[in-house]
Image (cartoon, rainbow, N blue to C red):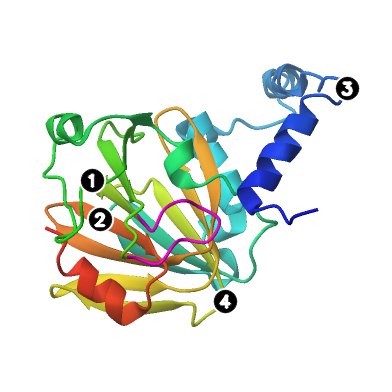
Amino acid sequence: MPELTPLELERALAGLAGRIEYPSTPALAPAVTARLAAERRGGIRPPLPGLALWTRRRLLVAVAIGLLALLGIAAAARLAIGALEIRVVPTLAPSPTVTPLPEAIGRTVTLGEARAGVGFEVRLPRGLAEPDTVRIFPSPFGDRSLLLAWTDPSLPPLEGTPWTLVLLELPGDEEYAFKLVAGEGTVREVEVRGRRGFWLEEPHHLVLETSTEVQTYLVTGNVLVWDAGGGLALRMETAQPLDEALALAETVN
């Protein structure tokens, strides 16, 4: 039997899950909420006003990242460029979904629709054809973010995907994209056009928050993140080595 790719395996398991009968999960939230409310009314439990400041989506982000890492416990390093934050944590949780990002987020649009709809100047690498996939997705803060993906044969393929390059364009200064990397030395600081950037070669997790959901992705390609100016963070996933990735990033304008 031929070996399945990660994407083929995920789809096969998802199809199998739909045919397995298992009891439904009981509705625990209403019971817990009612009990907490009763205890507070009776003076048994003090009110927690700070919890009201956490939206359900933010709680999901905390869970996805791991609460200890999110709060900076265990000496996790925090590096941020605009809307994207990198967390160096002691270890990574079990691998999340392997669905390639260009298949899993936002809605497909044309490049022209993207230029008209995102509210910022779309950045493209010079010398490449137009991207094969263009997707818009809303950030939780009202900005429209952009994903571009290429199958250009002049670039090495990203393992387990049909793409050779994936570019995320993330506007804003409030974080809604989080990278979790394990161990010191996995993040290298670089410069792109004189602006701060980071290079990641090790497999890591990407937690991406939109206006409707929080998803965690396993990233196996090399990633270059940098400040493009104008309040825009760029994230480029590639199979190229650092020197070639930096040269390509220098052409993005």
- Asked if the residue under mark 4 is in contact with the one under mark 1, i.e. CB atoms within 8 Å, the reply is no
Going by the image, does 81 lie left or right of 59?
left
**Residue topped by disc 1:** 171
Q: Amino acid at mark 4?
A: Gly
Query: Label 2 to label 4, Cα distance in Å?
Result: 24 Å
Image side of residue 17 versus residue 131, left or right: right
Report if the CB atoms under discs 3 and 4 are less than 8 Å apart. no
Residue at image position (23%, 31%) is 110
Crowding at dot 4, Cα within 10 Å, few <14 / some 14-19 / many 20+, comes out as some
Element marked by disc 4:
loop
**Which residue bears the numbered disc 3?**
21
Q: Are marks 1 and 3 in contact (CB under 8 Å)?
A: no
Give the amino acid at mark 1: Pro
Is mark 1 in CB contact (under 8 Å) with mark 2?
A: yes
Dividing the picture into quadrants, the one containing residue 228 is bottom left
Residue 183: which numbered mark, if any?
Answer: 4
**Residue at 78%, 31% in the rendered image:** 17
